Structure formats: structure tokens, C-alpha cells
Amino acid sequence: MKLAILSRAPKAYSTQRLRAAAEQRGHVVRVLNTLRFAIDLSGPEPDLQYRGRPLSDYDAILPRIGASITYFGTAVVRQFEQMDVYTPNTANGIANARDKLRATQILSRHNIGMPPTAFVRNRADVRPAIERVGGAPVVIKLLEGTQGIGVILAPEVKVAEAIIETLQSTRQNVLIQHFVSESRGRDIRALVVGDRVVAAMRRTAQGDEFRSNVHRGGAVEAVELTPEYEEVAVRSAQIMGLRIAGVDMLEGADGPLVMEVNSSPGLEGIEKATQLDVAGAIIDYLANQVAFPEIDVRQRLSVSTGYGVAELLVHNNGDFVGRSLGDSGLAERDITVLTVHRGTTVIPNPRKATMLEAGDRLLCFGKLEEMRSMIPERRRRRAKVRKLPAQPLPEPAG
Ligand SMILES: Nc1ncnc2c1ncn2[C@@H]1O[C@H](COP(=O)(O)OP(=O)(O)O)[C@@H](O)[C@H]1O
Ligand SMILES: [Mg+2]
């Protein structure tokens, strides 16, 4: 394959290792400076210039986009996506992972354990938010910090309020997060490639530091993950749309708590701690996936007027229960079932003989009008009926 590593740091350990691993395997590899691309939308097809000249053809890119150039970097990655060049991490995935709030919002509906987190703007909402996540000591985080910079532990509510107010007055957005003290300055970094964890390490903060980042002097050691930690790491990366990711987890009393998902994880600490060829695993994965550039399925399937994608629910006592897919009448209504979600398992390309069960979720492509009546009701956060107070309401005066 012909691979472009997008990086501004050709000399950095990670870049060098990735380049060497690609060359070793007989691939053609170039390290291209992300900031020297020009996005070209002047011609009939989306195009890219590099250092002022038309870019040659590549089979795959490996984006290593630093936090300081997220906007331009993701625009370049998006352009490669438009040109059907394979990328393990999409522009959307990188942008979502970069913003700690956005990442938390996306992960929160997928049953991924995370430290309780709040985000507020008004000064009056700060104290209740701190209390909601568990009170002081409390962690305060800049939305786009890396390497531990921008992560603060405030010992008291008053101090926390002052810090938040100061940061907000300089137009910095901050997260308020429960301090997971049982983790005792340690965390787990799992390196996910595709659908598996290829290496994992435990990082331990030194001295009175609570941040375990390698850049903050954290000590690293290889660690064997339990299936629970492994599954949470892989699922988090998948949900974020990242095939290559470093997932940071705290060891909470009840299991893994995901703090963040890094889209350009450093390789030095983890390769040295584990003695594993992580760069090689990444290159092998890319070579294997090159034929499958990312496709925005919903977007592509929505271009025929009146057609689209929807998820249909098999109701408890509805018509579908106990019938096979072939007898469900969906095909006759011009609806194709792409996958059946059953609990935590997925049946891809279900056959006609597949029996439908209550609670199944069918991912369908078809006429939107036909599907409208079958779309499940939105789940309610709270019961609609409010409990009445024990005492009868007083009669209105007059
Ligand atoms: N809620 C928390 N409770 C305890 N420790 C935390 C918490 N959040 C972060 N940390 C510590 O701070 C480090 C940096 O936090 P993280 O959210 O990963 O930011 P960064 O992007 O700067 O690495 C973590 O690796 C962990 O050691
Ligand atoms: Mg981190």
C-alpha cells in the first residue's frame, strides 16, 4: 500500500516507528506535514494540493493531528474521506474525541462507565453542579487539554468556584468532574487497533501529583487487562468512530471509568512499557482495511427522495413477534432489514428465516413514509405522572 502519515513531527518517536514499521513490511510511506496541504474545491472532484503541487495517489492515510491544529487537520482528513482514501480515524471521530465534553456526551448514552461530569455556564449553576458530581475535592478540566495540562484538582468548593470563574472569565470552557479517589493516582491506557486492544499499560502519578500522564512524570508498567476493561476500551473507540485510539480509564470501585479517548495516541510510553510492536500492529491493520474507505451510510442512503434509514422496534405484543423476517411483510412494503440488534448482539444481513423476538431493533432501509408508523416512541427520562404530595393541596383562597 502507499501510505501517508499526516504529522507535523517527522522526528517524533511515534512517527519514526510507524514509518519504519511500514517500510519493513514493504509499503511505500511518506510523512506529510498536515499544515502544508491545500484543500482544493475548484475542480469537478474534491482534491488536495501538497506544498503547492497536486498530491499523488495514496491508498491510506494515518492522521496524527495535534490539538493545536484540530480544525485544519480534520478538514484535511475530511477531504481525504471525500476522495475515498482510507483513514482509520475519521474527521468526525477526531473532532469528537478532541473535545472532552463532546466525547462524554456521545459515550454517555452507550452504557460506558464514566466519572460523573457536569458542564455549566452561569455562575449560579456552578455550586449545584459540583455538589451533583459528589462535592469537593473535585476535578476541573479544560475541554481541549492534553498531557495533563488543564486538569486541576480543587480541594474545596470555594476554591473550585474561584478557579472556574477565573477560567470562564478568560473564555475557557471547563468540565466539572467527580474526583475518582479510589484510583489513587493511577490509570489505564489501552491501545485499541480495530476491534481489539493490542497493548495496555498502567500509569502511576509520582509524588503528590494526581495526574498520571507520562508528560507529568507518570511511571508506566505493562498490564494484563480483564475482559471487562478490554471490552469497554474497544467499545468506546468504536462509538467515537476511531479504529486507532488510546483509551484512558480510571479504576473505579465498580469497574472501568472512561476519561477520554485519544485519536493520536503516543507510542513511546506504551511500546517501552509493554515491549510490544504497537506500530507494526497499526500498519498491519491499515494494510488489511485499505479496501474499505469509510462511508457515511446514512448520507449515502438518503439521497433517493423519500428513502432513508430508520431503526424499527419489535414491540412486545406487536405483529412481528414470533414471525420470521420473510413473513413480516417488510419486504413487500419495500423495506430492507440491514441488521437486527438483539440485546448486546447483532445479526448482520439477517436471513428470511430469522425469527423476530420482542425487543429486537431492526436497522432498515426503505420508504420513510412506510417506516414512520413503526418507529419506536422516544424513551422518556421520567415518568409522566408526578407523585402527589401526601397532604392534600390547600384550597385556593377566595
Ligand atoms: N476524575 C478524575 N479522577 C481522578 N483522576 C483523574 C480524573 N480525571 C483525570 N484524572 C487524572 O488526570 C490525568 C489527565 O486527565 P485526562 O482527562 O486524561 O486529560 P489529558 O487529556 O490532559 O490527558 C488522568 O490520566 C488521570 O491520572
Ligand atoms: Mg489523558
Image (tube, rainbow, N blue to C red):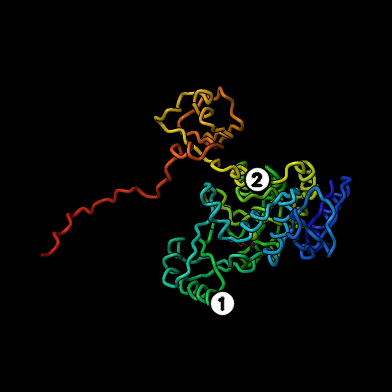
Q: Residue 98 got which mark?
A: none
Taking the spot 61% from the left edge, 47% from the top edge, the residue there is 299
Q: Amino acid at mark 1?
A: Thr
| Structural distance between the alpha carbons of marks 2 and 1 | 41 Å
Instruction: Give neighbour class at mark 2: few <14, some 14-19, many 20+ (Cα, 10 Å).
Output: some
Left/right placement of residue 226 relative to residue 372 reads right
* Label 1, ligand 1: CB separation under 8 Å: no
Q: Amino acid at mark 2?
A: Leu
Taking the spot 58% from the left edge, 60% from the top edge, the residue there is 100
Foreground residue, 341 or 272?
341
* Label 2, ligand 1: CB separation under 8 Å: no
Q: Earlier in the sequence, mark 2 or mark 1?
A: 1
Q: Residue 170 got which mark?
A: 1
Foreground residue, 205 or 135?
135
Left/right placement of residue 328 relative to residue 12 reads left
Taking the spot 70% from the left edge, 44% from the top edge, the residue there is 194
Residues tagged 2 and 1 counted as in contact (Cβ below 8 A): no
In the picture shown, does residue 321 fall above or below 30? above
- Ligand 1 found in image quarter: bottom right
Q: Position of residue 133 (x, y in %)?
A: 46, 60
* Residue on which the image places disc 2: 225
Quarter of the figure with the C terminus: bottom left
Quarter of the figure with the N terminus: top right
Q: Is residue 16 visible?
A: no
Helix, strand or loop at label 2? It is loop
Q: Is residue 281 visible?
A: yes
